[in-house]
Image (cartoon, rainbow, N blue to C red):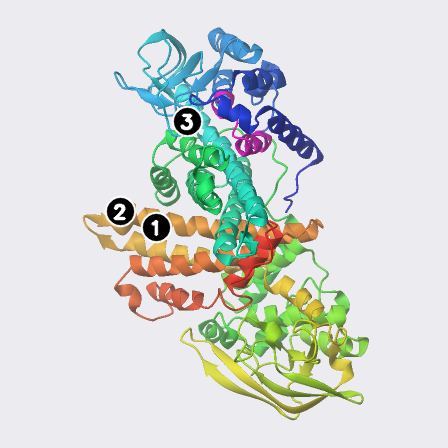
Amino acid sequence: MKLGLSDDSLMLQNTFARFFEAESTPARVRAAEPMGFDAKLWESLVELGVPLMRVSADAGGGGMSLFDATLMMDHAGRRLAAAPIAEAVVATRILSECDNEVAREWVARAGDGSAILTVALHRAKPGKTQLVPGAAAATAIIVFDGEELAIVVPDHTVDSPLTLGGAAIGRFDPSLGARHVVATGAHAARIWSAGIEEWKLLTSAALIGLSQEALTMAATYASERIQFGVPIGSHQGISHPLANDVIDADAGGLLLSWTIRAVADGHPEAGATISMLWWWAVRTATRAVAHSLHTFGGYGLTNEYDIQLYHRRAKAWALTLGDPEDELLLGADRLLTGTESVLPDVGAVDIDFTRPAHAQALADETRALFESILTPELRAKAHYSFEGHDWGVSRAFGAAGLLYPGWPKKWGGREADADSVRASSDVWDDYGWTIVPKGVTGMIAHVVMKFGTPEVQQEVLPRMGAGEITACLGYTEPSCGSDVFAARTRAVRDGDDWVINGQKMFTSGAELASYVLLLTRTDPDVPKHKGLTLFLVPTDTPGFEFHPVYTFMDERTNATFYQDVRIPDRYRLGEVNGGIKVMGAALELEQSGGSLYNHMRTLAEHAIEWARDTDKGAGKAIDDPRVKLRLARAVIDARLAEVLVARVISARAEGQPDLAFGPAAKIFSTEAYIADSADLLDLAAPESLLRSRVGLGLIEEDYRHSTATNVYGGTSEVLRSMVAERRLGLPRSRM
């Protein structure tokens, strides 16, 4: 997996960032209104070769990949470029695939600036006009009527009605003007259809860039605007919606990269994802600009403030294609019923979400081990929680070095890379086998490796790696909830020992664990976050007790009690009163999004299976457009969650700055999982109410499972504050 840009792509990205910052200033954008065309900007774009950037070098173009073209469009979106860039790029790309002199002549004219080309996004129909982006500034428009692909040169100035946000939209009548046919039949249909798909990808990039820039503007304003004596961005009512939006925008950018790679690789869901990506980009832009404008309050409504330009263009750029829900439905048809799509040739793609061969090899080995040890009785025992743990399975994986394959060999691992570890871990989800005990134990082991004494490391890590023991977390207290820094459980030094007294709540897995990673207060006289120390407490120490607490999710957790629990100082992790540093290392792993995307994908698959088999009206439920839309939303949420987690792994592997990528992935995954499981439970009602471990019962189980996912590992509210502060640069939040 490689998500970082190549040096060439970085150079191109930086070039266009500087170009649009200089050539598409807010003043220039305003001057281009109301039509939305900046002639001077267009001249500069022609000088850079932008209209021909997707035309092959052999045909006189730049030969640029579609991925690199989206990098350019991202910055065009950020600066609200008042020019039909995506339309011109697509128009010349279409014409370059028409093998005739007329097409080549118009490509040359577009390249030397003597003609501006755009493309009609909908099929031309006799006597029917359509609104075409860029048509008000164009010399010629590419049209397709179902049989002929033609260049239409209007015999009059195309009407430029006043619109929501410029984009040089023109009301175009394809029957009025000189018509030059450049392709016919299946060949014409193929290149026009591929061109429209390319336009969606390019414009999605612009909408994502627009969203991110609007959010940056809002965050800057919220950090500077003082009300009630503090910056307004310190209030969660302001910061949390912006955090949600930037997660969605970042997810859209990652999905764009995934989609282009999928097209290049011939992925079966590539065509469907283009349409679903478009829907997501439009939806995200709508929400991002609304919340951004709201951040400015009344000032955001005034023409003097730039945010209103973003608010209007978020819709003006998108809706020339029509209702975004129609595009989502097209994606659903492509995904669920096999509707065919014609996709563009995207060229080289440096970004790669796929697993390398060695990672797949470890996944295959993991799968083979499951097949060899999972008896029918064990398969029936499988559960997503600690209740699904089996010591025999744990030891078998430990003996094979597959329980923690990323660990050093001396502790029982394989020293596998992050791609391999993720691939192996995904197989556990494929089998529905609980990953929670090993996940929690692995996180605690990471802390022990980093902060534990050699003596404790040798005592604990080999047995963990062998699958012989597990550990659990002792953070939360009955009166503290997510405010773990308010912990009252006391640890008092007594010579070479520490004596611990207190109570913890929601200590899941304590009934299995040999150790508890325990957060204690060691100095009550300093600020609460400075007086904390972590210990690894053996659960067989006198004075430790646990009592079961059962939840409606079919999970057991525990209340744990510590009465004069005496442990040697060697079990201390990190410095005395340095617990916040130790916790940071643990939370970095816990707040990474995990593998909920696998549960989300399986949830969607169960619902799709139900829809294919269930009668509804005159056909099956899968034939109902409303059903297809809801299934498509669940599918795309799972993919978005997956790419957000991929970013976490990639950023760590490549040493990139971590701008709360883990918290962002967890927020999105858990909130989408909760929403989708509830929606699909509704969709299949009332039969979905019945509890079982098969069929619709799995949707009901997912509904209950999802409920707590936005609580443990850090509540969504806490994590949103982290995203707001680290990703958007907002001040520390307050209630």
| Residue 118 falls within the magenta-colored stretch | no
Q: How far apart are the alpha carbons under marks 3 and 1?
A: 26 Å
Q: Residue furthest left?
A: 618
Q: Which amino acid lies under the numbered mark 1 shown in the image of this protein?
A: Arg
Task: Identify the secondary structure beneath mark 2.
Answer: loop
Q: Which amino acid lies under the numbered mark 3 shown in the image of this protein?
A: Ser
Task: Identify the secondary structure beneath mark 1.
Answer: helix
Locate residue 707 relative to residue 613 in the image: left or right: right
Q: Which amino acid lies under the numbered mark 2 shown in the image of this protein?
A: Asp
Depth order, front residue of 337/547: 547
Relative image position of residue 580 (x, y in whole percent): 68, 69
Relative image position of residue 505 (x, y in whole percent): 53, 80
Q: State the count of labels.
A: 3
Residue identified by numbered label 1: 630
Relative image position of residue 591 (x, y in whole percent): 59, 62
| Residue 67 falls within the magenta-colored stretch | yes
Q: Give the mark, 2 or 1, whose residue is nearer the N terminus.
A: 2
Q: Nearer the viewer, mark 3 or mark 1?
A: 1
The image's mark for residue 193 is 3
Q: What residue range appears in magenta?
A: 66-89
The reply to whether residue 190 is visible in this rendering is yes
Task: Identify the secondary structure beneath mark 3.
Answer: helix
Query: In the image, what residue occupies the spot 69% across and 52% down?
Result: 653
Tell whether label 1 touches label 3 (CB within 8 Å): no
Locate residue 326 relative to residue 111 in the image: left or right: left
